[in-house]
Image (tube, rainbow, N blue to C red):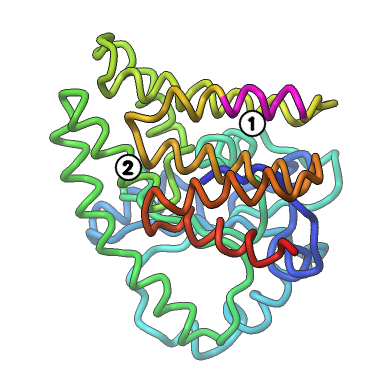
Amino acid sequence: MARAIVLLTALTLLYLTPLPRLQAQTLGGGSLAAVQARAQHEHKPVALYFTGGDWCLPALRLKAEVFDTAEFHQAPQNVLWVTVEFPQQEDQASAQDLALAARYGVTTLPQVVLTTPTGLPFARLSGYQPGGPQAYLADIKALLPQQERLEALQKAATSPPALDALYREAERDGVSQTSAFAGIPQEISRLDRGPGGLGDRYRLLDQYNALLASWSGPVNWQDSANKLTKLAARAQAYPNLQQTILVTLGSLYFDALHEEDQAKTTLLQALALGDTPEAHQARRLLDRLP
């Protein structure tokens, strides 16, 4: 779920670093095209490793504890690795790497995006992961079965319900905002124009995402709360979407408007809609309330 209000904490600084204006060096370990050609020959996925080099603390820890170890280099590799490094210097920008980061929705470092040999993303592993090379490689291996599921859904995606199934799988895999899948909501809206159907759900989702995107500048939080309240009411036919909107609204009441009673009421409404990751987030917010 898109986070309603992002709080910069010490934990964030330890595990993730925002991408600095997307400046990047050229690809390491050979060109992406060459690696993809080899991947097709060997029938292996590609792991695009987006890193910050010598300025990004989480990337430095991951490099020292995983990628620079003999255990990592000696272990059987289930994927072919490509490194995309982003230094802080502005004069080292590469159009190729800028496009690559945008294509795969990379905004924080370090980050691994797993793709098929033809470039279709199917999983993402973000941030510093403690545990050393054995644990890191196990995390990568655990993501590999998602490739087959996503490819099968993509081949069958010729109708709004099939497109919806594909998009939901991409959301679960953390790749729905990549260029391969980001246009699916608009396509569903185009194909299904009737009220109460999938198209209506995705039009509501699009309005919700547009509201979140508007929060990058000066924000009238009360006006945003009013808009979220209306969206939640309209999303009654779509419990999962309604729950997502209500959790965002409850977070806004708590963190931005400091209306604790309203936050509690809203979050309890979200909890009543089912036991989901969004419900778990609602519980964590409720635990912070007096």
Q: Residue at x 81, y 25 (%)?
A: 220
Residue 176 versus residue 73: which sits nearer the camera?
A: 176
Give the Cα separation between the discs numbered 2 and 1. 19 Å
**Label 2: how many Cα within 10 Å (few below 14, some 14–19, many 20+):** few
Q: Position of residue 73 (x, y in %)?
A: 48, 82
Q: Is residue 178 above or below residue 16?
A: above
Residue 80 seen in this snapshot = yes
Q: Main secondary structure of the magenta part?
A: helix
Q: Mark 2 = which residue? A: 168
Q: Mark 1 = which residue? A: 212
Q: Which residues are magenta?
A: 222-229
Toward which corner of the image does residue 196 lie, by quadrant?
A: top left
State the residue lying farthest toward the bottom.
71
Q: Amino acid at mark 2?
A: Arg
Q: Position of residue 168 (x, y in %)?
A: 32, 42
- State which quarter of the image contains the C terminus: bottom right
Q: Secondary structure at mark 1?
A: helix
| Residue 37 appears left or right of 56 | left
| Residue 108 appears left or right of 236 | right
Q: Residue at x 45, y 50 (%)?
A: 174
Q: Residue at x 42, y 74 (%)?
A: 139
Residue 197 versus residue 93: which sits nearer the camera?
A: 197
Q: Amino acid at mark 1?
A: Leu
Toward which corner of the image does residue 45 lie, by quadrant?
A: bottom left
Q: How many marks?
A: 2
